[in-house]
Structure formats: structure tokens, C-alpha cells
Image (spheres, coloured by chain):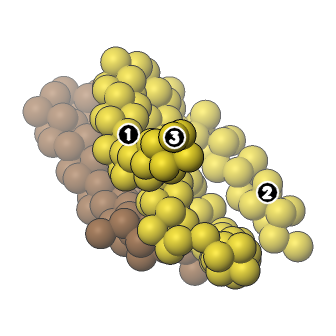
Chain colours: A yellow, B brown
Amino acid sequence: MEMIQIVGLCIVTTILVVLIREDRPEIALQMSIVVGVIIFLRMINQILVVIEYLKNLSLRANINNLYITTVFKIIGIAYIADFGSQVCKDAGSFSIASKIEFSAKIFILVLSFPVLIAVMDLIIKILP
Amino acid sequence: MEVDILFKIAAIGIVISILSKVLDEAGRKEQAQMTTLVGVVIVLMMVIQLVSQLFSSVKSMFQLY
């Protein structure tokens, strides 16, 4: 079972990180980055299944392709930003982490503006 | 497969810390510093490849171009 593998990997990594952090905090940080990447690469197949289902659902509901693509882009940006900010937080530099989150928020805002404008157009159309 | 890299990094960390301690004891401060630097660079080379793999897979998965 995949879940047990991942939990085992995480526990082993945590023990190694705790062991190494005393002398070499920079290498311990890089180990935590690597374990995050490995877990994501293992989850890719499942995430692809979820994305396929969501696409099918949106196709059935007749939703414009632009909107569902926007949602996926926002999820991707949020994931990358969260990954980076958590690495920074692990290393103790909280200010850099909050800057990453700030830039991710701005990017998401820029991406979501077309949807907002479409909602505004709809409201204006409905109102007399 | 991918899990190997984790243990490789852990081994490099342990070896580097032992080496730098030994060099420190022998009174070679500069070489201990250099060993630390080289270890970080070697590990960074491995980590960067993995992170770029992660970024490219996220990009293709969520259609971020």
C-alpha cells in the first residue's frame, strides 16, 4: 500500500534529519526538500486521475474551458508557492516565506480577474 | 529508485560532518570550511535536478506555461 510506504519514508527521513540537523542544518534542509519532491512525484498518478475526473465533470456540466483551466492554474501556483514557503519556514526565514505567499496571492489575483469580469458581465446582463 | 537519493544525501551529510570535525581537530580550519562548502554544493546539484523535475511536472500537470 502506497500510504504505508509514504509514512515509513517520512518517519525514516525525519529521524535522519534530526540526526543530521545538529551538525549540518543546511543538508538537513535539503533532505526535507527532497522528501517533499519524492512524495509529490509518487502522488502524480493519483493527481492525474483527479484532474481527469474534474475535466470530465466540467465537460458534462458544459462549463467553459477557460474557467476550469484557470482553476487548475491557480491550484498549481498555490502548490508551488506552498512548497517554497514551507521550505523557507523550515529553515527559519519566515519573512521570505511570507514574501513567496504574497507573490503567489498576486499571481492568483491576476489569473482570476477574467473570471471576475465574466461574473460582472453576467450581473450587468441580468440587471435591467 | 528515487528514495536512493535521500539516503545518499544523508550519507553525504554524515561523512561531511565527520570530515570537517576531523579537519578541525587537526587544526586545518580552512580545509574544514572548504569540505563543508563542497558538501553543500554536491547535495545542491542533486536537489536542484529533483526540484526542476518537480516544477516541470507541476507545470505540465496544471497547464501553467
Q: Residue at x 71, y 58 (%)?
A: A9
Q: Quadrant of residue A15?
A: top right
Give the residue type that dot 1 points to: Leu
User: How far across and how far down the image is residue A70, in percent?
Assistant: 46, 60
User: How far across and how far down the image is residue A84, in percent?
Assistant: 41, 42
Task: Tell me: residue A55, above or below residue A118.
Answer: below
Q: Which residue is mark 3?
A: A128
The mark that comes first in sequence, 3 or 2, is 2
Q: Which mark is residue A8?
A: 2
The mark that comes first in sequence, 1 or 2, is 2
Q: Nearer the viewer, residue A66 or A15?
A: A66
Q: Give the CA distance from mark 1 to mark 3.
A: 29 Å
In the rendered image, the residue lying farthest to the front is: A128
Q: Give the CA distance from mark 3 to mark 2.
A: 61 Å
User: How far across and how far down the image is residue B11, in percent?
Assistant: 49, 56
Q: How many residues crowd mark 1 within 10 Å: few (<14), some (14–19), many (20+)?
A: few
Labels 3, 2: front one: 3
